């Protein structure tokens, strides 16, 4: 079996995954037979392959050590492992058709290992239909199935995020965040003025942090509604002013998502 744990450092990226507290906690859970059925990791794309090497080696090993030379450990090849399914690539999310085929494959019996590991790359960039097609799988993977979502921003759709064990390897200082939606009318007015000339992509980056904050407070439905607004804004090429109005109506006026876009369609 090839060495799947190279030195975890490269120019410009000094995070040692294997020495991190996050990995120690996850590794302990695996050793104790409590490996998460669905895990999401937020990290730079330069770290994804190295984390996957560490994690997949442990999950697919029959003893859970990744170092015992079992038949599953010996099955690793340069192209991967027969019981590791990969959906999408880093920076290239999968479409809904690929998601459906992926789900069918994950329900098949493992070839060599005790479980199958399904890896979904760039999960935060999937279209809403593609991401929603994985909801049931994330909530209840098949017996003998494990899921790993990789993201570069903590903006996985809230309905999936609420169903996974989330680990964040992005340093907080590197996250461009406004902690939460404005709490006062005067702050809303300031935010509306400050963001009205932003490109939609920059507005989305700002609002992503609101989604994270809402998820952290357990407001999954509201977070999902914000996510849906931003998805539709991109899909329909909405002007920023319309997106601002929708966010204000949802988060300050308490209007339901369905009513917001019903009103917008009528105007």
Image: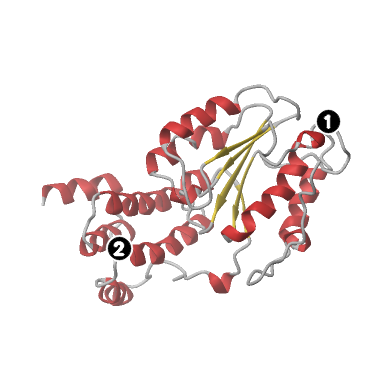
At horizontal 15% and vertical 47% (from top left) the residue drawn is: 265
The residue located at (38%, 70%) in the rendering is 183
- The residue identified by callout 2 is 200
Q: Secondary structure at mark 1?
A: loop
Pointers 2 and 1 in contact (CB under 8 A)? Answer: no
| Foreground: disc 2 or disc 1 | 1
75 relative to 7, above or below: above
Relative to residue 4, is residue 49 drawn left or right? Answer: left
Residue 256 appears in the figure: no
Judge whether 240 appears above or below 75 on screen: below
Query: Left of 259 or right of it: where is 229?
Result: right
- Between 7 and 141, the residue placed more toward the observer is 7
Q: Position of residue 23 (x, y in %)?
A: 74, 56
- Callout 1 crowding tier (Cα within 10 Å): few <14, some 14–19, many ≥20: few
Q: How is the image coloured?
A: secondary structure
Marks 2 and 1, the one that precedes in the sequence: 1
Q: Quadrant of the N terminus?
A: top right
Who's the residue at 79% across and 45% down the image? 2
Q: Residue furthest top?
A: 109
Left of 262 or right of it: where is 69?
Answer: right
User: Residue 13's quadrant in the figure?
Assistant: bottom right
Give x and y (percent) for residue 72: 79, 32
Is 229 located above or below residue 7 in the figure?
above
Looking at this view, name the residue that lies furthest to the left. Answer: 267
Image-based side of 92 in relation to 231, left or right: right
Q: Residue at x 68, y 31 (%)?
A: 83
Residue 107: % across, % down: 60, 24
Marks 2 and 1, how far apart at CA: 51 Å
Mark 2 Cα shell of 10 Å, populated few (<14), some (14-19), many (≥20): many
Q: Is residue 68 visible?
A: yes
Q: Which residue is mark 1?
A: 71
Element on which disc 2 rests: helix
């Amino acid at each position: 079996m090839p060495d799947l744990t190279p030195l975890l450092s490269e120019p410009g990226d000094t995070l040692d995954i294997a020495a991190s507290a996050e990995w120690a906690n996850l590794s302990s859970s695996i050793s104790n037979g409590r490996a998460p059925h669905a895990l999401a990791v937020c990290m730079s794309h330069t770290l994804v392959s190295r984390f996957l090497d560490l994690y997949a080696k442990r999950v697919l090993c029959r003893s859970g050590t990744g170092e015992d030379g079992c038949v599953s450990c010996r099955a690793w090849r340069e192209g991967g492992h027969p019981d590791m399914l990969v959906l999408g690539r880093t920076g290239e999310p999968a479409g809904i058709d690929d998601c459906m085929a992926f789900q069918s494959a994950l329900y098949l019996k493992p070839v060599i290992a005790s479980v199958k590991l399904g890896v979904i790359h760039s999960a935060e960039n999937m279209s809403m239909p593609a991401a929603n097609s994985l909801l049931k799988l994330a909530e209840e993977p098949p017996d003998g199935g494990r899921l790993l979502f990789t993201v570069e921003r903590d903006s996985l759709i809230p309905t999936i995020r609420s169903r996974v064990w989330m680990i964040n390897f992005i340093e907080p200082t590197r996250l461009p965040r406004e902690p939460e939606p404005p709490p006062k009318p005067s702050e809303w007015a300031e935010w509306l003025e400050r963001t009205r000339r932003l490109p939609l992509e920059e507005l989305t980056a700002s609002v992503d942090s609101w989604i994270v904050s809402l998820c952290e407070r357990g407001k999954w439905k509201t977070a999902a509604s914000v996510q849906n607004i931003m998805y539709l804004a991109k899909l329909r090429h909405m002007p920023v002013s319309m997106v601002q109005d929708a966010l204000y109506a949802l988060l300050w006026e308490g209007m339901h998502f369905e009513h917001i876009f019903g009103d917008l369609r009528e105007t």
